[in-house]
Image: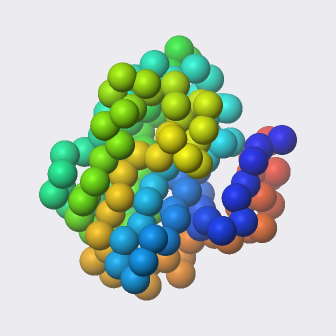
Amino acid sequence: MSEIKQNLKYSKEHEWVEVLDDNKVKIGITDFAQHSLGDIVFVELPELDDEVTVDETFGSVESVKAVSDVYSPVSGKIVETNSNLEDAPESINDDPYGAGWMVIVELSDSSELDNLLSAEEYDVFIKEEE
């Protein structure tokens, strides 16, 4: 069974969002997603100051099984990336909600957060996919 953190919001593309303050969020892929992918061997992240748009790709995750796009659950500007993933992409497998975070985004429209799933809604969603 996949770990789902109560304090996060989730997308149907299996990204999690942690609200840091009024206009910044931290984003990564969920425990369910990393389990589905298998051992992650490479992560491609956007550049600082890149603009991301809700539901559009901002990077990819390569595992021993496949390469998967990572979709932005929000719109805004990349203000920080997790450079540790360059040397340790397996951090996503080991700690998807901690050391495996991917980017921090300065939101252009905080109301987009209202379209994301709660932990309970995400739990129901992934059970339907299993």
Count of picture labels: 0
Q: Nearer the viewer, residue 80 or 1?
A: 80
Snapshot colouring: rainbow
Give the residue at x 83% y 41%. Answer: 1
Can you give x and y, in whole percent of width and height, for residue 93 in the image?
59, 30
Question: Is residue 50 in view from this perspective?
Answer: yes
Can you give x and y, in whole percent of width and height, for residue 72 in the image?
39, 57
Give the residue at x 36% y 52%. Answer: 103
121 shown above or below 92: below
Give the residue at x 51% y 41%. Answer: 99
Q: Is residue 89 left or right of residue 56?
A: right
User: Quadrant location of residue 80?
Assistant: bottom left
Position of the C terminus by quadrant: top right
Give the residue at x 58% y 20%. Answer: 39
Q: Is residue 112 left or right of residue 95?
A: left
Question: Is residue 66 in view from this perspective?
Answer: no
Q: Nearer the viewer, residue 39 or 20?
A: 20
Can you give x and y, in whole percent of width and height, for residue 67 in the image?
44, 26
Q: Nearer the viewer, residue 35 or 100?
A: 100
